[in-house]
Image: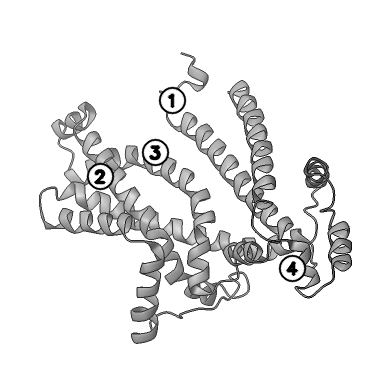
Amino acid sequence: MPRYIFTRLWQSALTLILASIVVFIGVRAIPGDPALAMAGEEADPETVAATRERLGLDKSIVVQYLSFISNVFRGDFGNSLRTGAPVTELIGATLPVTLWLATYAIVIAVIVGVLAGVIAERFRGRWPEWIANIFAIVGLSVPNFWLGILAIMYLSVILGWFPASGYVPVLDNPITGLYYLTLPAIILGISLAAVIMRQTRASMIESMGSDYVRTARAKGLGRFRILFRYGLRNSLIVVMTIVGLQLGGLISGAVVTERIFGLPGFGKLTLDAVFTRDYPVIQAVVLVVTLAYILINLAVDVLYSVINPRIRVGGRK
């Protein structure tokens, strides 16, 4: 196990460095000149050149990258080209919003997905399974932005059940904060709930046909006890894997959802940075999301090998 973790750590570090190179070159391929955007469209060439020199954009791309990566190792992502504020402060102000939204969406997705998967397995071939399958198809095929627009139109504007936009910090007012996040979290978690439902159903069908379940039935155990004690318990390993792998995707996928519901999270920060060609913010956002993917995948791999003793880490018997 320690050797496996060490190997994954250096692989993760290499992945993070490669990602930093890709994003550093990629953001500079975005059309437009940030120095011209900051100096103004009517600025004279001398002012634009001075702005470019002040931002360090007059140096070669290799020198710019080395300066950037050395600052990152010191925890300094630079200042925003648009507002002049430190990028770390911008991330610290917006990342908690996205984390709360993603966590809330995962909780909803797990509850709905597992429940729908259990119902689909329990009532195979009957109308409850058909409804669960329709839910899964809709969740996987309909884009989140379209569901979000429909939800705002009917659940917020017409019925008035949820606010159409706005945000209240959860730590300041937990009840009101979660109320404002409920509808965005439902929209963001629908596709994940559909995946969990399908995987839970398939895993439970396999578990319910295994030898130990037949033994439990022979001993006279009730169906619901077998269903939850043996079938669902083993299926939760698959659910944990899906949740771990999808958490990073929810953080990055919250961009559209936050934009639709007007949440001041990571998504708004990212889109504003892209539209204004704010290099430091874009670079920092991508690196933070990449780091989240790496850490979550590493944690899932380690926990999966611990929970399921049949798995041998590193391929050892």
* Residue farthest along the front direction in this orientation: 45
Give the mark, 4 or 2, whose residue is nearer the N terminus: 4
Amino acid type, callout 3 = Ile
Q: Of label 4 and label 1, which has the lower sequence position? A: 4
Q: Earlier in the sequence, mark 1 or mark 2?
A: 2
Q: Nearer the viewer, residue 306 or 104?
A: 104
> Judging from the image, what secondary structure is the residue with disc 1 in?
loop
How far is mark 3 from mark 2, CA to CA?
13 Å
Q: Are marks 3 and 4 in contact (CB under 8 Å)?
A: no
- Residue 259: give x, y in percent of width and height: 52, 70
| C-alpha distance separating marks 3 and 4 | 50 Å
- What amino acid does circle 4 point to? Ala
* Disc number placed over residue 37 in the picture, else none: 4
> On the image, numbered disc 3 is attached to which residue?
237
Q: Which is in the foreground here, disc 1 or disc 2?
A: 2
Look at mark 1 in the image and give the residue it sits on: 309
Q: Quadrant of the N terminus?
A: top right
Residue 206 is situated, as x and y percent measured from the top left of the image, at: 23, 34
Residue at 40% over, 70% down: 148
**Quadrant of the image occupied by residue 271:** bottom right
User: Along the horizontal axis of the image, is 104 left or right of 161?
Assistant: right
Q: Give the structural element (helix, strand or loop) at label 2.
A: helix
Label 3: state its secondary structure.
helix
Q: CA distance from mark 1 to mark 2?
A: 23 Å
What secondary structure is found at the residue carrying circle 4?
helix
